[in-house]
Amino acid sequence: MMELKKLLNIKYSVIMAPMFLVTNLKMMMEADKCGISGCIPALNFRNISDFKNALKELKEKCHHAFGVNVIVNKSNFFLKEQMKWILEYQVPYITTSLGSPKNIILECKKNKILVFSDVVDEIHAKKVQDLGGDALIAVNNQAGGHLGQYSARELILKLKNVVRIPIISAGGVATKAGFDEIMSLGADGICVGSPFIACTESDVSTSYKNACVNFGAKDIVVTNKISGTPCTVIKTPYVEKIGTQQNCVEAFLNSNKRLKKIAKFFITYKGFSLLKKAAFGANYKQVWVAGKSIEYVDKIRPLREIVERLTK
């Protein structure tokens, strides 16, 4: 295996996770300056033109490897166009989520672009390795957003038994002690998201950032109302009011084979619209995605300080 810092030629074996609505270009540039690698969701851009311009800027201004996250299942109607520009600008690596990365890996191999795929168990990990994936994002049960079922320790040890490619642990880390513990288990790097929500470079609302400061691990709940897939959010009064389970109509549509694809799109669209309003606006519908590592967020800090807390 190869430690992440060697694979990406960065100072520390850390990826700033691709956070929907949160990760922006300012954060990406600052992560690059701090010796870690930033990864940004392709879906964080309003249209393909904005996405294209962002890739151009990242290629010009980042001195080290940066990444782009793509959703690879059928709900992402923009995947073909996103991949066109990822290949055009020779993005150093991509991370894949929510679907089989088979076709993406084939495309990227031809263009010498690394592919890291989200996995939650050894079955999917073995498939990614067999397809030619370059590394695994091992999503554990402490991750923010879409999470896995195993602890970091359980998942890393399971994966080490079946794969030879690098393992990047995602979830639960916000301190140097946590980073060192994960690496001692045999991981090749970490992927960290939630602690960066409250950085000064983020454009999300002060209310969202303060929620990450004032709430803790015990306040994180799992909901399937956002995308039909289990997702972690902060248990605000509004989340308590609407509940965390789909209503009977949503559940039926999401399980019906004929209607599932369309239903998933509309459930996701509705959920993402709610997240966007909550992330940037001041309203009572506060649905904020975060993981249990907000337990260690004690104030709004510059991104550089968050990196230092992880690495020094």
Image (cartoon, rainbow, N blue to C red):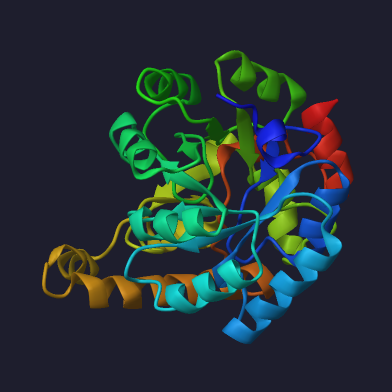
Residue 74, position as x, y percentages in the image: 32, 70
Q: Please state, as top left, top right, bottom left or bottom right, where the C terminus lies in the image.
A: top right
Q: Residue at x 40, y 72 (%)?
A: 76
Residue sitting nearer the eye, 189 or 206: 189
Q: Quadrant of residue 245?
A: bottom left
289 to 279, vertically: above or below: above
User: Residue at the front extreme?
Assistant: 110
Residue sitting nearer the eye, 27 or 116: 116
Q: Quadrant of residue 50?
A: bottom right
Q: Residue at x 52, y 43 (%)?
A: 220
Residue 267, position as x, y percentages in the image: 34, 72
Residue 311, position as x, y percentages in the image: 80, 28
Residue 289 appears in the figure: yes
Q: Residue at x 52, y 75 (%)?
A: 84
Residue 284 appears in the figure: no
Residue sitting nearer the eye, 138 or 288: 138
Relative horizontal placement of residue 17, taking residue 10 as reference (left or right): left
Q: Quadrant of residue 208?
A: bottom right
17 to 171, vertically: above or below: below
Relative horizontal placement of residue 162, taking residue 196 as reference (left or right): left
